[in-house]
Amino acid sequence: MSVQERKQRERADRERLIVATARELAEHHGWDAVTTRRLAERIEYSQPVLYSHFRGKREIIGAVALQGAAEMASAVRAAASATDGPRARVTALAHAYLGFAERNPAVYDAMFQLDGGLAFAQEDTPEPLKDAFAALLESLGEVAGDGVHPALFTEVFWAALHGLATLTRAGRLPPQDTERRVELLVDRLAVV
């Protein structure tokens, strides 16, 4: 291995450590606790080293969001592929999405609530975000109904899931009714 390759590997390792540490801090203490000073202390590198990887907290949030998008896409695909039939796939997708949001609140915030400097629904949208949407579209597109554009239907269904996740987490919706809400969403929106 050349010196250059070793340096690149070490740089990638440091970047992963920064993102993992930011994510851990955010999940345990909230995003306000994620500061460059605290991250530098936790990873035992100086703040200038941190800034050599990320220009600031916004870029760190973006990196966490991209990581979360990849994880969510994987969870949604795994849940949908473990079932048979469109209704079961859509129901599994909904539960996987809501479960991901519940288990990873800080990551979910990085993805959809905080400014991570990422473009959504544009040509320069990062690939992990496009893939997360594609993971939803793969199952939802088949239940959009006649004359309904699959991507548009996916956006509406996703918006409903996001609303359920956000309102439940905020205590605006009782969590014990989540299953009934998912059933209602699938019954009323999806053509299965």
Image (cartoon, helix red, strand yellow):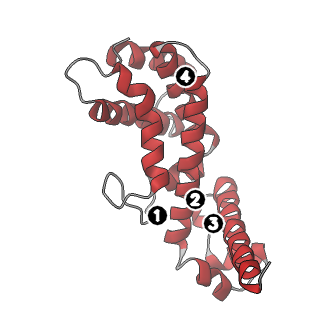
Q: Quadrant of the C terminus?
A: top left
Q: Which mark is residue 188?
A: none
Among the 4 quarters of the image, the one containing residue 21: bottom right
Earlier sequence position, callout 1 versus callout 2: 2
* Front position in the image: 64 or 128: 128
The local secondary structure at tag 2 comes to helix
Evaluate if marks 3 and 1 touch, with contact meaning CB atoms under 8 Å apart: no
Q: Which residue is mark 2?
A: 64
Residue 58 visible in rendering: yes
Question: Which SS class for mark 3?
Answer: helix
Kindly indicate whether the residue at mark 2 contacts the one at mark 1 (C-beta within 8 angstroms).
yes
Residue 178 percent location from the top left of the image: 52, 22
Disc 1 vs disc 4: which is toward the camera? 4
Whole-angstrom CA distance, mark 3 to mark 1, is 16 Å
Whole-angstrom CA distance, mark 1 to mark 4, is 29 Å
User: Between 182 and 143, which is closer to the camera in this rendering?
Assistant: 143
59 to the left or right of 44: left
Q: Say which label, 3 or 2, has the lower sequence index.
A: 3
